[in-house]
Amino acid sequence: MSVALLVEPPVVTHEARITDAALRCIARWGGAKTTLEDIAREAGLSRATVYRVFPGGKDGLMETVAKSETRRFFAGVAAAMATADSLEDTLVHGMAEAGRRITTHEPLQFLLAHEPEVVLPRLAFGKLDEVLAAGAAVGAPYLESWLSPDEARRAGEWAARLVLSYVCQPADSQLDIADIASVRRLVRTFVLPGLTQPSRGTT
């Protein structure tokens, strides 16, 4: 018997099918116009099944989608930083990956363009502090190879601020926050000069 036949395909849960379907619907119609019926149809499930998996209805489903996409985003950024072997590359890879994931995320881009009131409150006032703290927490463990723990967290928060700034208000047309070379110029010009590099990462 072929070894390939012994490998079972991954199990896709109803929750995963529903959240993926919700993302496709949001990218197509936005959050306001997407209904549970739309999502159930897209997932190939009954409306009753969607309610059984998400008893909170559409609000509960959308909150789950937001949380799962946030986890996926930070996991991707962490994986990009893990491949770097210098302070510069850690910052560049992390920031460019964050920019790429945001600018190519179709549901998020639809919301930013047509329903900003859904997204922007999560990036303002106290919510912004939470976002920056999360960015710092993800980046710090990788930056600590070259910086003190306090400075690593500061650098992680600084990088997160820059990414959000260029994503939400891309005033500098010469900078593509999703492009490695473009982000490297930004990091070399404005970020690295403000950081102190102890000898630990350079010996």
Image: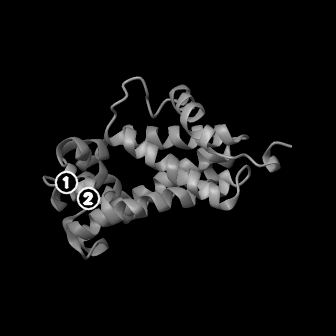
Q: Residue at x 37, y 28 (%)?
A: 172
Residue 8, quarter of picture = bottom right
Q: What residue do we see at 54% from left, 48% from top?
A: 77
What kind of element bears circle 1? helix
Residue 196 image position (x, y, % from top left) = 69, 47
Q: Give the image location of residue 159, x and y in percent.
A: 51, 46
Using a 10 Å C-alpha cutoff, classify the residue at mark 2 as few (fewer than 14 neighbours), some (14 to 19) or many (20 or more): few
- The tag on residue 150 is none
Determine contact: label 1, label 2, CB under 8 Å: yes
The residue wearing badge 1 is: 117
- Which residue was labeled with disc 2? 121
Tell me how the rendering is colored: one colour
In the image, farthest residue toward the top? 174
* Residue 159 as seen in the image, left or right of residue 65: right
Is residue 11 in sight in this rendering? no
Residue displayed at 82% across by 47% down: 199
Dot 1 alpha-carbon crowd within 10 angstroms: few under 14, some 14 to 19, many 20 or more: few
Q: Quadrant of residue 137?
A: bottom right
Residue positioned 24% across, 75% down in the render: 56
User: Is 85 in front, or is 49?
Assistant: 85
